[in-house]
Amino acid sequence: MFSFIKKLDRHDKQALFTCFFAFFCNGTLALMMGSVMPDLKAAYNLSDTTSGVFISAHSAGNLIAGLVSGLVPLWLGQKRSIFLLSGLAFVGYLMTTIAGWPAWLFLAFLLIGFGRGSVSNFDNRMVNQLSGGSPAASNLLHSCFAVGAILTPLMFLVLRNTFSWQVGVGYVILLGCISLFNMARMQLKNDRPSPKDKQNSTLVFLKNPSFLILAAMMFCYLCSEYAINGWLVTYIQNKENLLADLAASGSNAVSYSQTMASLLWVVMLVGRLTCAMLSSKVSQKIMMMVSSIGVAIFYALMLSSTTMTMVTISVAGLGLCMAGICPMIYSDAAIFTNTYPLATSLILGIGSAGAILMPTIVGSLAEAYGFTGGMSAILVTVVLLVVFSVLNVVVKTRKPVIQ
């Protein structure tokens, strides 16, 4: 599983581990949104629809980053670009602790998304290049994301209860400073790609059916993941039948919902490490298809569950099945991303486009039909994910022709 690391020199290993830590920080950034949202709503008197718009603003920032962050290195270089762009995410979270004007918070979440998207673009492309597109490397990278996601709800809960929610947000800002320090010390080969090389700016891969299927899978997956991460804590705290069961057992809804957010990522970590071990024995296309079917089953089960036991089982199964899908999409797309630098930007951008829409839809439907009705909208993209994962197995992969 770790054989690809042994082939790297000292500077490449440093770059690899910098990417791993930056993705750990990306996990904290992602889960902090769902953890802090109830406090933001209470502190600044926000509606569910407005909160959903902020989550969508984060996704919009991701989309912009996908389109822009692949081009900026042509002028600033990769190291300087990722240092400057990733720092925007931590500036955004700092802004959430200062004021609650809707336009101010919209800008804050936009910056958070832009910073996160820039790191996703850089890390996935760099790890694919360093490892030669190894599925194990991609799953390990995304396992670091899962570790950050696991710790965040628990750290936030402790800091919030001990001090304040603003101190909880300070946790991710501190990690950001460490990540920026690591990035400043990187030594990258070919740090400044040539703007004159057409291969660095071409979009010819968009004509390839295999790439389009993978992009559609990323669209559906990120649409589902972002909405689930953004609304899971709030959904559990507003599910009436479940609240009755929690009250009967003497459990606290706030603590239970934050624990479920962490559980989701604990099992995702286990799943990604498992996928990394299985990647040399089982086709990742088959694993993605089976995982997508599992996501559909467990998500439907979660929506219909009204007891702590069934919700816990559903969340655990959902996380286990979601675990390897995103990293394996990136790994499967390595034949494109390692040939065309903008392929990573586009696959991230297309995925982010789907993630922009769904959180707002969930928030709007929740106000009209309750959170179960709002969260049910995610089933549409989950079913489409199953369809495209089947096509990814059935349609023969066409390798890109270098032009």
Image (cartoon, rainbow, N blue to C red):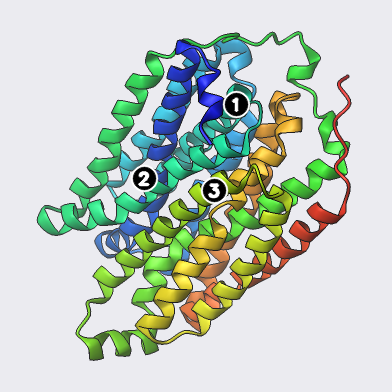
- Say which residue appears at 23% left-offset and 41% top-offset: 170
The alpha-carbon separation of the residues under discs 1 and 2 comes to: 22 Å
Whether residue 192 is situated above or below residue 312 in the rendered picture = above
Label placed on residue 148? 2
Instruction: Point out the tag, 2 or 3, that comes first from the N-terminus.
Output: 3
Name the element at disc 2. Answer: helix
- Say which residue appears at 44% left-offset and 36% top-offset: 23
Where is residue 110 drawn, in percent x and y?
47, 42
Q: Residue furthest front?
A: 281
Q: Amino acid at mark 2?
A: Gly
Instruction: Point out the tag, 3 or 1, that comes first from the N-terminus.
Output: 3
- Is residue 198 visible from the viewing direction of this image? yes
- Horizontally, residue 293 falls left or right of residue 369, namely right
Q: Residues within 10 Å of mark 2 (few under 14, many from 20)?
A: many
Q: Dot 3 corresponds to which residue?
A: 59
Q: Amino acid at mark 3?
A: Ser
Name the element at disc 1. Answer: helix
Where is residue 295 drawn, in percent x and y?
59, 67
Nearer the observer, 375 or 182: 182
Label placed on residue 131? 1
Whether residue 75 is situated above or below residue 269 in the rendered picture = above
Q: Say if mark 2 contacts mark 3, CB within 8 Å.
A: no
Whether residue 74 is situated above or below residue 340 in the rendered picture = above
Instruction: Point out the tag, 1 or 2, that comes first from the N-terminus.
Output: 1
Q: Amino acid at mark 1?
A: Ser
Quadrant placement of the C terminus: top right
